[in-house]
Amino acid sequence: MMQEFWNDRYSQEAMVYGSEPNTFFREQLKLLEPGKLLLPAEGEGRNAVYAALKDWQVQAFDYSDAGREKAMRLAEQCGVSINYRLSDAEKYTCDPESMDAIALIYAQFPPALRQSFHKKVVQWLRPGGKIILEAFHPNQSAHTSGGPKDVAMLYTAAMLRSDFEGLWIELLEENEIQLNEGTYHQGAGYVTRMVATKP
């Protein structure tokens, strides 16, 4: 079961993806005025804690209690507060149009869940709000730097264009990058990145 897999991985003493935020997330967040931010599938909390340090009001969730424990510990060490719930993507709910930004950083789901979850994400975003997304692309299968082994859980630009139809897409690219995020995201990786605004 995937939940057991993540609990097992996050039970390690070290921060398995490091304690620094994702590079693309950090670059994009700098361009925005702080407000309310949602981080789905947030794991050990590196992005949530970074955003809270930058004066964002952070809501996050993950279904791994081991991940949440590490996130809360990191927040305490950094002297910030984050609202982090234990939930899976299917059950998580949020008020409509309540978020200024939603960041999907390696929040990768099987196709049916991906499509339904992305629809919900759009509903939660206020008009003018931004989605920041970085996910592994199908070309990642040829790399050893992490990501789902199930190709159906890897995202192309075309999938995201379809999922987020109706949003203004400012950036949508498929790139090879160098990953340096803890133990499990190291070396060359192939990702899809998107920034989109709700009209």
Image (spheres, grey):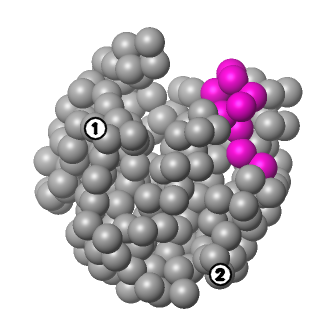
- Secondary structure, mark 2, is strand
Magenta segment, which residues? 146-156
Q: Is residue 34 magenta?
A: no
The numbered mark at residue 74 is none
Vertically, is 197 above or below 159?
below
Q: Residue 92, how many percent across, how many down?
A: 31, 46
Q: Relative to residue 8, is residue 188 drawn left or right?
A: right
Residue under the point 39% across and 40% down: 90
Q: Mark 1 highlights which residue?
A: 87
Q: Residue 171, how many percent across, how many down?
A: 72, 73
Give the position of the C terminus as an image quadrant: bottom right
Foreground residue, 30 or 119?
Answer: 119
How busy is the neighbourhood of tag 1: few (under 14 within 10 Å), some, or many (20 plus)?
some
Residue under the point 39% across and 80% down: 126
Overall secondary structure of the magenta stretch? loop
Q: Mark 2 highlights which residue?
A: 168
Q: Amino acid at mark 2?
A: Trp
Pointer 2 with pointer 1, Cβ within 8 A: no
Q: Amino acid at mark 1?
A: Ser
Residue 66 shows in this picture: yes
- Secondary structure, mark 1, is loop
Distance Cα–Cα, label 2 vs label 1: 29 Å
Residue 185 shows in this picture: no
Q: Looking at the rendering, which quadrant does residue 44 occupy?
A: top left
Q: Residue 162, how many percent across, how many down?
A: 72, 61
Residue under the point 28% across and 38% down: 87
